[in-house]
Amino acid sequence: MTIKEYVYNEDEVFRLYSEAGWVAYTDDMAALREGFMNSLLILAAYGDDGLLGLIRVVGDGATIIFIQDILVFPSFQRQGVGSALLRAVLERFAGVRQIELLTDNTEKTKAFYNSMGFHEFSEIGCCGFMKC
């Protein structure tokens, strides 16, 4: 597996987000494209079959980053792709004080992020808010 900076390809992005079930994003590809163009960093994992998954980061890169998206094609999940992508981001931004993300509240996702050193906000005396 090779990890490198991602060059936006709309068909590829549409396929990845669709297969991962993130159709709220694919319903507005213009907004998703704009999001990609304004991201701080996008890394992709590639294998013999091409794109395996990607991770998208927003923020200032110095004091805070937010891991906006981390997606792996379903056929490549649970093979270390997501972990490799997340490790690559954590290494690149090792000096950043706040590294945050928002994810589904499932045991599977919580176990994954806990295994990567993340903690729920409540565990560190914080809470989060979101305007919906």
Image (tube, rainbow, N blue to C red):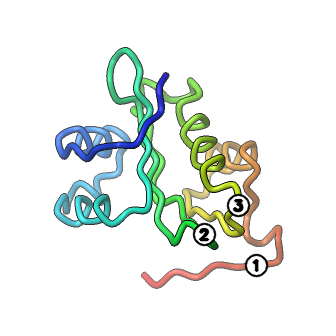
Give the mark nearer the N terminus: 2 vs 3. 2
Closer to the chain start, of discs 1 and 2, is 2
Q: Secondary structure at mark 2?
A: loop
Q: Which residue is mark 3?
A: 95
Quarter of the rendering containing residue 28: bottom left
Mark 3 and mark 1 in contact? Answer it, CB < 8 Å: no
The residue sitting at 73% across, 55% down in the picture is 118
Coordinates of residue 78 in the picture (x, y in percent): 57, 28
The crowding category of the residue bearing disc 3, from other C-alpha atoms within 10 Å (few below 14, some 14 to 19, many at least 20), is few
Q: Secondary structure at mark 3?
A: loop
Residues under labels 2 and 3: Cα distance? 7 Å
Query: How many residues crowd mark 1 within 10 Å: few (<14), some (14–19), many (20+)?
Result: few
Q: Which residue is mark 2?
A: 62
Q: How many marks?
A: 3
Mark 2 surroundings: few (<14), some (14-19) or many (≥20) residues within 10 A: few
| Quadrant placement of the C terminus | bottom left
Q: Amino acid at mark 2?
A: Ala
Give the amino acid type for the residue marked by disc 3 in the picture: Gly
Name above or below for residue 122 compared with residue 30.
Answer: below
Instruction: Residue 83 in the image: state x and y as whole percent.
Output: 61, 36
Q: Which residue is mark 1?
A: 126
Badge 3 or badge 1: first in the primary sequence: 3
**Relative to 78, does residue 93 appear above or below in the rendering?**
below
Looking at the rendered structure, the secondary structure element under dot 1 is loop
For image coordinates 64% across by 43% down, the residue present is: 108
Q: CA distance from mark 1 to mark 2?
A: 21 Å
**Between marks 3 and 1, how big is the CA–CA gap?**
21 Å
Q: Nearer the viewer, residue 112 or 66?
A: 66
